Image: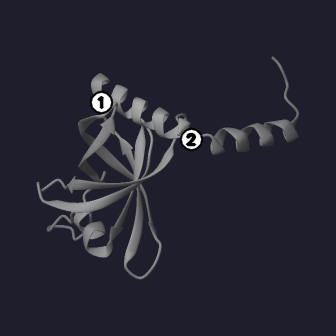
Amino acid sequence: MLEIPESEQIQLLVIMSNERRHSLRIHTHIIAEVINRNGESMEATITDLSVGGLTLEVDSIAANHIEVVDASTGEPYFPVEVSVVFTLQVNNALSHIEVPCRLVHKRRLSQNIYRIGMMMIVVNEGQREQLSRYINDAGNA
């Protein structure tokens, strides 16, 4: 069995834990519709986007809208899942994207503004291609 010195093991662990994202992520300002588990929708802004996830910037009302509370327990349903609907312009054509997403993190930026990281749960091949093309075009601009 190969032995790796302890100092290199720690360094390797740190590198691996910092590499959670495996795809190019771009900064954006895309208006999206977020549909919660009750079918209610609110507006949010997508501030960054990759083929595997996105970040929403929302006010406190929209943040509460995303985390629907179970009336019997008073706690948000877990996992927190929503549909995010938005439109991209790819090759001079509009591409409608609707993806189910799971909340990964929520961070309060100010009194009334939150940043919410979402992981895309299922992306069909056509949507993945459109996302990839949009992100690559933006990255090369």
Q: Secondary structure at mark 1?
A: helix
Numbered tag placed on residue 20 in the rendering: 2
Numbered tag placed on residue 23 in the rendering: none
Which kind of residue does numbered mark 2 sit on? Arg
Specify which label sits upstream in the sequence, 2 or 1: 2
Which residue appears at 37% of the width and 79% of the height? 112
Residue 127 image point, x, y percent: 30, 30
Q: Which residue is at the front of the view, 12 or 111?
A: 111
Which kind of residue does numbered mark 1 sit on? Gln
Which residue appears at 23% of the width and 62% of the height? 43
Report whether 79 appears left or right of 65: right
Which mark lies nearer to you, 2 or 1?
A: 1
Label 2 crowd (10 A; few <14 / some 14-19 / many >=20): few
The CA distance from mark 2 to mark 1 is 22 Å
Numbered tag placed on residue 127 in the rendering: 1
Q: Secondary structure at mark 2?
A: loop
Q: Is residue 55 above or below residue 11?
A: below
Residue 13 image point, x, y percent: 71, 40
Residue placed farthest to the left in the image? 39
Quarter of the image where one finds residue 125: top left
Q: Is residue 59 above or below residue 51?
A: below
Residue 99 image point, x, y percent: 26, 40
Which residue appears at 12% of the width and 56% of the height? 38
Label 1 crowd (10 A; few <14 / some 14-19 / many >=20): some
Q: Which residue is at the front of the view, 47 or 55?
A: 47
Residue placed farthest to the front in the image? 92
